[in-house]
């Protein structure tokens, strides 16, 4: 049941990325490249997502258990630390170079040919490298 | 000058992205973004890999579902070389795991909960991505 919900949520999430055209790197670069005919669409994507998640979260956050009975777990970290900022810097650099971030890259796997595939493979390798790094510093 | 601005489809798409994230919170009880879901799913053996793998599969399959009602080929325009794509992918993969989130986790689920960590992360990656595009 949990997997079915996960699958459906993934499809809805992916459809949102497609409809918002976030699966097109040129559209994302149109937002990031502020001096060349700036396209503010991405801000509207975030705005729409923020309002829906924000309102839903406020309505549900008092619950101890999810609708499927699992205990609700909220993120507990609150410190602004070096990994947070450094991670955001690295991510921002990678995102700025290609216009691809994790969700859109996955949603574009079947439409983006070898560039999308190459990016996703490199991204997965990057995540594994982080896992190795985590083990090293422990 | 503003070109190619598509406010309504952007807003509607954003609403669906918010609903997908909210569904995970409402039914599974986790506040999660795509990089965290993928990163945890890659660990495979962890408890909770089941729904995370299913979520990733759903995102990947979304274009096939979209095709049911609109068969217009979806645009995917990119002019990065393969080396740039590899560098970009490595940075995105490593960076999102180190910084605990991407545009969906920090950008949508984080900011909407007024998480200071997420606000700092989003401001940082936005500014860096914009600077990269100014100098690139």
Image (spheres, coloured by chain):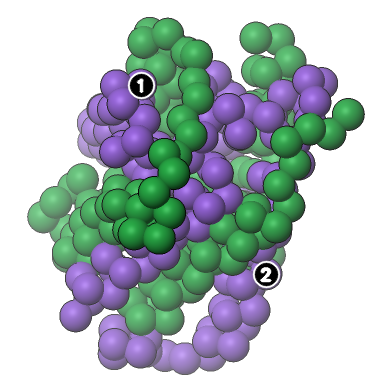
Chain colours: A purple, B green
Of the residues tagged 1 and 2, which is closer to the observer? 1
Residue drawn at (62%, 43%) of the image: B121
* Image-based side of B61 in relation to B122, left or right: left
Residue B66, picture quadrant:
bottom left
Q: Looking at the rendering, in which quadrant would you find the C terminus of chain B?
A: top right
Quarter of the N terminus of chain B within the rendering: top right
Q: Secondary structure at mark 1?
A: helix
Q: Is residue B106 visible?
A: no
Residue A28 image position (x, y, % from top left): 60, 34
Disc 1 vs disc 2: Cβ atoms closer than 8 Å? Answer: no
Q: Which residue is mark 1?
A: A115
Percent position of residue B78, x then y: 49, 21
Labels 1, 2: one chain? yes
Q: Is residue B29 left or right of residue A77?
A: left
User: What residue is shown at x 27% (from left), y 33% (from top)?
Assistant: A124
Residue on which the image places disc 2: A51
Against A26, residue A17 (above or below) is: below
Which residue lies most toward the left here? B45
Q: Residues within 10 Å of mark 1 (few under 14, many from 20)?
A: many
Which residue is pictured at 74% across the width and 15% down the height?
B134
Report the residue at 50% width, 25% height from top.
B77
**Looking at the image, is A20 positioned above or below residue A91?**
below
């Amino acid at each position: 049941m949990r997997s079915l919900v996960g699958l459906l949520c993934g499809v809805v999430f992916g459809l949102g990325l497609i409809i918002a055209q976030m699966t097109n790197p040129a559209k994302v670069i149109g937002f990031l490249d502020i001096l060349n005919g700036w396209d503010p669409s991405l801000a509207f994507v975030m705005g729409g997502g923020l309002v829906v998640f924000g309102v839903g979260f406020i309505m549900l956050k008092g619950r101890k258990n999810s609708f499927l009975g699992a205990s609700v777990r909220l993120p507990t970290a609150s410190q602004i630390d070096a990994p947070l900022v450094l991670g955001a810097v690295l991510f921002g650099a990678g995102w700025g170079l290609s216009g691809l971030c994790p969700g859109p890259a996955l949603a574009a796997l079947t439409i983006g040919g070898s560039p999308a595939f190459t990016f996703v493979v490199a991204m997965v390798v990057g995540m594994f490298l982080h896992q190795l790094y985590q083990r090293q510093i422990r | 000058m503003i070109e190619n601005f598509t406010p309504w489809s952007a807003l509607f798409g954003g609403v669906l992205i918010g609903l997908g994230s909210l569904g995970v919170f409402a039914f599974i009880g986790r506040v999660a973004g795509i990089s965290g879901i993928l990163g945890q799913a890659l660990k495979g053996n962890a408890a909770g890999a089941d729904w995370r793998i299913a979520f990733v599969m759903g995102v990947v399959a979304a274009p096939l579902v979209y095709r049911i009602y609109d068969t217009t080929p979806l645009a995917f325009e990119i002019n990065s070389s393969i080396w740039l794509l590899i560098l970009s992918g490595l940075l995105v993969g490593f960076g999102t795991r180190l910084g605990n989130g991407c545009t969906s986790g920090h950008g949508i689920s984080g900011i909407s909960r007024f998480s200071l960590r997420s606000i700092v992360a989003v401001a940082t990656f936005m500014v860096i991505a914009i600077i990269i595009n100014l100098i690139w």
